[in-house]
Image (cartoon, helix red, strand yellow):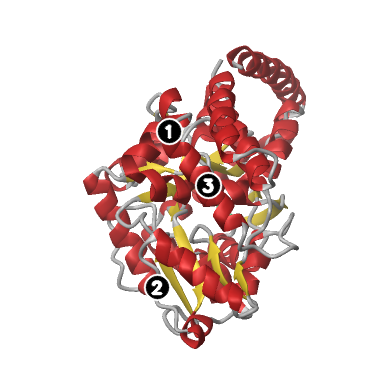
Amino acid sequence: MKIKIVSLMLALLLVGTSIFAGGAQDQGQDDSMMEKVSNNVEVLHWWTSGGEAAALNVLKEDLEKKGISWTDSPVAGGGGEGAMTVLKSRAVAGNPPVAVQMLGFDIIDWAELGLLANLNDVAEKENWDAVIPDALKGFSKYNGVWVAAPVNIHSTNWVWANKKMLDDLGISIPETWDEFVMALEKVKASGKIALAHGGQAWQDATVFDSIVISTGGPEFYKKTMIDLDDAALRSDMMVEAFKRMAVLRSFVDDNFSGRDWNLASSMVIEGQAAFQIMGDWAKGEFKNAGQVPGEDFVAFRFPETQGTVTFNADQFVMFNVDESQQAAQKELASSIVAPGFQIAFNLVKGSVPARTDISDAEFDIVGKKGMKDLAEASANGTLFGSMAHGHGAPASVKNALYDVVTSHFNGMYTSEEAAAELADAIKSAQM
Ligand code: BGC
């Protein structure tokens, strides 16, 4: 795998260098005409749901006020797999966008290729080092150079529920796994859909983040999803985790396969289903539908993961661009990190600010809880990167996990087989 990455890097560098060199020559020929400054930023992202688009508008409008126009390059697909595929072909063609939404380890992979911009002057001027938490900085900076502007912090171990349905069925918020299963059974018996889920690998893996913590506790999550410990990956505890995945599988409806995550959120919003296990971008959908937390919907930590937070942060990675585009690119970076924008944006997106110096005053009860949980988990050593969303391990390992988790969810492996397959797949992904 290492060899594969290195050869991809070389290929990208060679193609990139020759195309960039060609560009520089062309530029040299008509230097006098090339002094024009571009006030446009092209941004590649996967924010295509209603809530996500609403949040993105906050950024577009903020930039418009500053005289910067936006060229939108959306690529649908939660978790960003599709967007990363498009980015690879753009980079190979020597034509990367000005900025790209990216998660965790992917940023490091791109930084290693030497294709990213240096934002240190903006970061120093605005003191990013003092306000961006270390958990994020580990991905925003590469060899001491800021290459990305973090826009938020999401976390994956949440459950979203239709409040009226819970009230009607006399279900109180489940605190333990057993209570959760009983609640799911009660909904199923009522004829409604218990669990709204979309059968896509990244969504199955998102549920798996929570299941691993809930089954084995935070140390087990760290050992398996961060340290990639082979013995823990193939342990009885992991078999148990897969058994819990199979239990959840029995509560989804027949049409779950391939369903987009935001359609699953709509099922809860519209009262067709009771629960959805999803990161807090789901809150963006509830809010976009005019729903109020605590009144129309409730959000709680996945049972038996309370006290632990599996996070992912969206960052806008800045690519090396022509000099004429650099001022707009830096303005984009600066706007993303600005405190006022972090509040306005994250209120809509469902996430919490990527800065440690922001008050929770303007946030709703879920946002306030998200900020408090994050600070506590960080202080207690129970804040971990989400494996499903690129913050546990590099993409090669993440994709290996996706394959096994989704195959098991679709009945292709027993839970015993799945644990062994997972350990094997993760081992070979690291070779
Ligand atoms: C991103 C979120 C996004 C979600 C669904 C996650 O990987 O971090 O910003 O809303 O995918 O598209």
Q: Is residue 197 left or right of residue 312?
A: right
Tags 3 and 1 in contact by the CB under 8 Å rule? no
Q: Is mark 1 within 8 Å of ligand 1?
A: no
Say which amino acid is labelled 1.
Answer: Thr
Q: Quadrant of residue 307?
A: bottom left
* Tag nearer the camera, 3 or 1: 3
Residue 243 circle label: 3
Of the image marks 3 and 2, the number of the one nearer the N terminus: 2
Residue at 37%, 36% (x, y): give it: 222
Dot 2 corresponds to which residue? 173
Can residue 257 be seen here? The reply is: yes
Q: Quadrant of residue 35?
A: top right
Q: Residue at (71%, 37%) from the top-left corner?
A: 85
Residue at the spot of label 1:
224
Tell me: residue 145, above or below residue 52: above
Q: Regarding mark 1 in the picture, which secondary structure is present there?
A: helix
Marks 3 and 2, how far apart at CA:
23 Å
**Residue density around tag 2, few if under 14, some if 14–19, many if 20 or more, within 10 Å:** some
Say what amino acid the circle numbered 3 marks: Lys
Q: Residues within 10 Å of mark 3 (few under 14, many from 20)?
A: many
